[in-house]
Structures are given as C-alpha cells and as structure tokens.
Image: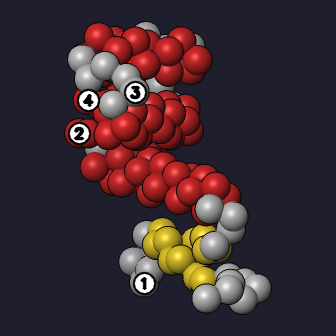
Amino acid sequence: MKTFIFLVILVCIFSSCERGDRLLNSRPAGVISEKHMVDVLVDIHLAESALRVANIQKTMPGDSTYQRSLFLEVFDKQRITPDEFQKSLSYYSAQISKLDEIYTEVIARLTQMESELRGSETEIKADTTKSGKPRINKVPVQDEQKPV
C-alpha cells in the first residue's frame, strides 16, 4: 500500500512539472511567434535603413510622421497591430535567449540580403560556437579579377 501511494505521488509530481514547463514556455496571447517576429524585425530594420538613406540624401522629410507611416506599412504587410508588436517586443526582451535567437536570424537575413545586393561579394556561412549558439562568418567568395 505504501508503495502504491508513493508511486501515485511520484506520478503527480512528474506530471505537474511537465505542465509547469509548458506553461512557462508558452507565449501569452497576442504575442507573435518567433518566426513571425524575425520577419517583422527584418522589415522594420529595412524601413529604418531606408529612412537613414533618405535623410542623408535629403529626399524625404526627417519628421517622425513619415517614420510612423513606414512602420505602419510594415505592420500592415505583416498583418499585425502596433500593440501586438510592442507586446511581442516586450515579451521577447524579457526572454533574452529567445531574443538572441531571433536577432541572430534577423542579422543573418539582412547580411544575406546585403550580400545579394552587392553581387555576392561575400558568402554567408552559418556556424555554431562551442556553446551551441549560432555564429555568422563572412567568407570571401573567389571573384574574377577587377581592373585596377
């Protein structure tokens, strides 16, 4: 009888731990997925870059209204609201390891886009460190000789 009670208690403990882990790792309502967050952040960084280039070239007004309109276009494209983005950003900011994974992917995508725009001057090579975290290396691609 004691063995039976011990086994029941042991099963309850293990099953509650499993549910607790799922609750701790689940996203709250209104928080977008990590994959979708990567897409949104890539578009936001591209919009910010376009603003910087436009301000340098003095082709666009430097006011925050234009910036807000660009960000709203990104949110419309990604089918999210500014509140969902803010809530997601706050959530992932509190989950540093997840935010690190998200930004590793964002940087990899932006670097790949830059490489494609530059005519594949560099090849992006994803690697992992000893700790298992992704590391991005730029490896020069053998190119034809450019005239001097």
Question: Viewer-proximal residue, 15 or 33?
Answer: 33
Residue, disc 2:
94
| Residue 8 in view of the camera | no
Task: Please tell me how crowded label 2 is: few (under 14), some (14-19), or many (20+) other residues with Cα within 10 Å.
Answer: few
Please say if the residues under marks 2 and 3 sit with CB atoms less than 8 Å apart. Answer: no
Residue, disc 3:
59
Q: Position of residue 109 (x, y in %)?
A: 56, 52
Distance, label 4 to label 2, CA atoms, is 6 Å
Please say if the residues under marks 4 and 2 sit with CB atoms less than 8 Å apart. Answer: yes
Question: Viewer-proximal residue, 106 or 70?
Answer: 70
Count how many numbered circles sit on residues in the image.
4
Residue, disc 1:
130
Task: Please tell me how crowded label 4 is: few (under 14), some (14-19), or many (20+) other residues with Cα within 10 Å.
Answer: few
Report the mark closest to the observer, 3 or 4: 3
Q: Position of residue 34 (x, y in %)?
A: 49, 38
Secondary structure type for disc 4? helix
87 relative position to 32: left or right: left
